[in-house]
Amino acid sequence: MRATKTYGSQSTMMVKVTGSRKTTVIFMADIWKQHTQWGSLYLWMPLEIGSGKLWLPKPRPWSLDLATGETTVH
């Protein structure tokens, strides 16, 4: 289940950023590679929240405007 819902990562924490226009929740996780620790990565992505659901979009580059709280996916 973990690999399909969080792209092989294990959640570490979530951070709420409240801006002037939007509140964004950032999902923070690590992708642990037991046999190659130097290849382990972090995954930070804004969560999609709406219609009573919460989901993590496919990992891709993104940016956050701290003043407004808005995210842009590149």
Image (tube, rainbow, N blue to C red):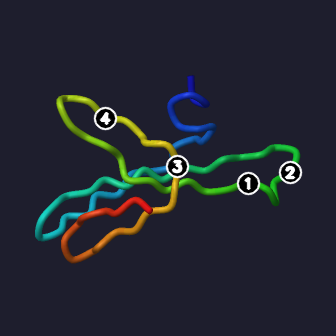
Determine the secondary structure under disc 4. strand
* Amino acid identity at mark 1: Ser
Q: Where does label 3 land, which residue?
A: 59
Q: Amino acid at mark 2?
A: Thr
Residue 18, disc: none
Pointer 2 with pointer 1, Cβ within 8 A: yes
Query: Which residue: 58% across, 38% down?
Result: 7
Residue indicated by mark 1: 40
- Type of amino acid under label 4: Leu
Residue pointed to by mark 4: 54
Chain-order first, disc 1 or disc 4: 1
Q: Nearer the viewer, residue 18 or 49?
A: 49
User: Which residue shows up at 52% across the image and 49% down it?
Assistant: 59
Tell me if label 1 and label 4 are in contact, CB under 8 Å. Answer: no
Left or right of 53? Residue 30 is: right
Q: Is residue 51 above or below residue 46?
A: above
Please indicate whether residue 47 sits to the left or right of residue 23 in the image. right
